[in-house]
Each structure stands twice: as C-alpha cells, then as structure tokens.
Image (cartoon, rainbow, N blue to C red):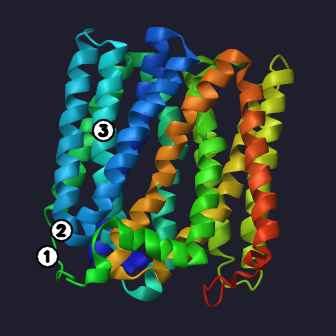
Amino acid sequence: MKLDALHSPKYRRFWLGSIGSTGATQLYFVGMGWLVFKLTGSALYLGLLGVAMAVPTILATLAGGLVADHGNRGRILLTTSILAGLTLGLLTILDLGQWVTVWQVLFLAALLGLISGFDMPARASFFPALIEPHQMMSAVALNSILWQGTRMVLPAVGGVLIALADTWLIFALCTVGFAVMTKILFSLQTPDAVPNNSDQDRGLGAAWQFIRQEKLFAVLIAMTWIFMFFGTAYVQIMPVFAEILGTGEEGYGLLLSATGVGSVLGTILVGRLQSSPRLGSVMMGGSVLFSLSLILFALVTGLAADWQFAFALACGCAMLSAVGGSFFLISSMTVMQLAVPDSLRGRVMGIHSITFSLIALGGLVLGPLAELVSAPVAILIGVSVVLASIVGFSIKFGRLWRLNGQDQQLHL
C-alpha cells in the first residue's frame, strides 16, 4: 500500500495531529463504556450510552454536512476540537472527584455526539483539499489506519489504565489529545470556500437527490449502514463479553484491540488489491468474512466460554470480522470520495459518516436483546440481518461484483 499522501506537508501535519483527537475518541469510548457498566452493571445502560452518543451525532451530521459545504471547514474542525476538549475536561473533574452519575455520563456523551456530528463531515471534506487527486486512495487508507491503529492499541492500554488508576485518567488523556489537535489546526486554516449559489445546490435535498440518482452511493451507503447497525454494533456491548469470558478490564480492552488489529490488517491488504480487476468480488467477500467471523464469535462466547482458549478464540474471531469489514469499508469510501462533487462533499460524505454513529445506535437493539436472551444470541440475530442484506443486494445488483480497481468505477 502506497503512503504517498504523507508527501503532502499539510496532510502530514493534519494526519499526525489527528492521532491526538482520534486516539482520544477511542479512549473515551472505552472509558465511558466501562464507567457506565461499573455504575450500573447493565447491558441495557450500555445500549442507552450508545443512543446518547449516536442520536445527537446523526442529527448534527445532517446539519454539519451543510455547514461544511458552506463554511470554512478548517475553522469548524478547530471549534469542534476545542469544545470536545472542554467537555472531556469536565468529565475528568466529575470522575476524579467521584461526583459522577450515570446520567451525567449520558448527558456528556450526548454532547460529545453533537460535537462529533459537526466534526465528521468537516473532517471528511477537509482533507481532500490537502492532497492531490492521485493521493486519495492513500489518504483514505491512512485515515483508516489512524482510526483502526489507535483502536488496535489504545483500548488495551485503556483497560490497563482503568485497572491501575480508574477511568478519570482516561478522560484526562483524552482532553490532552484534543488540545494537541487544536494546536495543529491553528496552522492548517484555509481560505473560505467560494459560495455556490446554484438553485440546485441548496440544502440537504441536493445531497439526497445525488445519492438517489447515483446507484453507486445508494447501494454502498445502505449496505454500510446495515453492517454497522446490526453487525459491528456488538462492540457497544463488549463489556458483557469480557464478563462472560471472565477477563475483566484488561480483557475488555484486548477484545476491542483485536478488532483494531484486524481493521489495520484488512486496510493494508485491501490497499494492495486496489488495482485488481476483481476488487468488487474482494469487497463483497470481505462482507461475508465479516459475517461468518461474528457468527463464530457468538458461538465461542455462547457455547465455549469455559474452554481454556476461549478468550484467544474470541479475539481471533473479532480480528477476522474486522479484516472483512475493512475490505468493504475502505474500498467503498475511496470510490465515493473520488466520485462525489466537491460542492456536495460535506453533505454526501456527512450522510455516509452516519455509518460510524450507527455502531453506537445499534447498541440500543443489541443491549436489550442481550438482557432478554443473551449477548451471543443478540449477535446471531444481528448477523442474520447482515447476511440477508448481502444476499438481497447481490441478487438485486449482481453487477456490483464488477467493481474495477483500475478505474475505481462501480458498474451497476
């Protein structure tokens, strides 16, 4: 996989600075999940945490895409980084002073979700201005490596830090991470975009119309949403699986880290296949690997939790599911970034970025299911929906398998 986007000085600074904010996002996800579970001992409350984070993010993302297309994307990112740092600083004080309640955590999670809703569309539409068009695949892959690499390392580190000092230290480090990103963004501010006054480019309607007209976007966004809501959302109830396997905080962090390892590995492998004429088959094959691996994860945790190597097997299954997920996600995101008009980039990619909020929102489904039946059975129910969508889209849009890596076009 080529990393030529790092040859751009501005993108290189942006990418290095994003280590702080992305790492902070990974850590506060771990910290909030464990804090809520410690305060309540309930998978249902983990689902509510997901809702508190996801619903404001989704609502704000729709507005955030519009703001990103008509405002200064660099200043938007600067503002969101400052606000996120202040919010996490407040949570640090509440947790350290032992004044924190579960409802305070849910409120601050919702506030962070609201901030993230404006951050993600601006981020997705800001970095293309820092690179050349031929560096797009590299930049998308690097962004994914950054996200998944921090997910590979930091949850395990977070689990150890929670065991040593409690969750307040996690939130303090997150505050520092956003402070670092804020400092970098001061040096990356760009001029205001030239406004587009076309009647056809007003509001969110233009973005939705573009997606409806382009089967490329409609199919890939719909598939990604289903995968995240019904499949990847199992990470939202990961503390439950750590408890089933009897591994505590360290095991919770390692299970999340396993998904990060798989995502980085999948990103590297799919980067080597971008010129393959069978890239469409590889992408869809990745979605099948994602689903089958989650089924194995559910079977291991549901039927073999007492086995000597159950935890290692669970980590392996989580890793394989993330490999398959990356094959699909990286390829689809690259194709869309190359095809979307810049005047609609913030809104269209903002709609796509709802994807990541659906992981947390899916916890509202899997959490109650885990309480009603069991966490492994909840996963099996979710994966059945994912597999049904794969079959349905493959029948309806069979030519999706003709995605050609050489011209990055999707023939539907």
User: CA separation, marks 1 and 3?
Assistant: 26 Å
Does residue 138 appear in the picture of this structure? no
Q: Which residue is mark 2?
A: 71
User: CA separation, marks 3 and 2?
Assistant: 21 Å
Q: Quadrant of residue 207?
A: bottom left
Is tag 3's residue or tag 2's residue first in the polypeptide sequence?
2
Is tag 2's residue or tag 1's residue first in the polypeptide sequence?
2
Q: Residue flagged by tag 2: what amino acid is it?
A: Gly
Q: Residues within 10 Å of mark 2 (few under 14, many from 20)?
A: some
Tell me the tag on residue 192. Answer: 1
Location of residue 223 in the rendering, given as x and y in whole percent from the top left corner: 64, 59
Location of residue 129 in the rendering, given as x and y in whole percent from the top left corner: 30, 79
Q: Secondary structure at mark 2?
A: loop
In-image side of 160 versus 389 (left or right):
left
Location of residue 53 in the rendering, given as x and y in whole percent from the top left corner: 40, 36
Residue situated in front as seen by the camera: 160 or 170 = 170
Q: Secondary structure at mark 3?
A: helix
Q: Quadrant of residue 9?
A: bottom left
Residue situated in front as seen by the camera: 332 or 190 = 332
Residues at marks 3 and 2 touching, judged by CB atoms closer than 8 Å: no
Q: Residue flagged by tag 3: what amino acid is it?
A: Leu
Q: Residues within 10 Å of mark 3 (few under 14, many from 20)?
A: many
Height in image: 21 above or below 266?
above
Is tag 1's residue or tag 3's residue first in the polypeptide sequence?
3
Q: Which residue is mark 3?
A: 112
Q: Residue at x 59, y 28 (%)?
A: 237
Quadrant (top left/top right/bottom left/bottom right) for the C terminus: bottom right
Q: Residue at x 55, y 45 (%)?
A: 152
Q: Which residue ends up furthest to the front in the rendered image?
A: 199
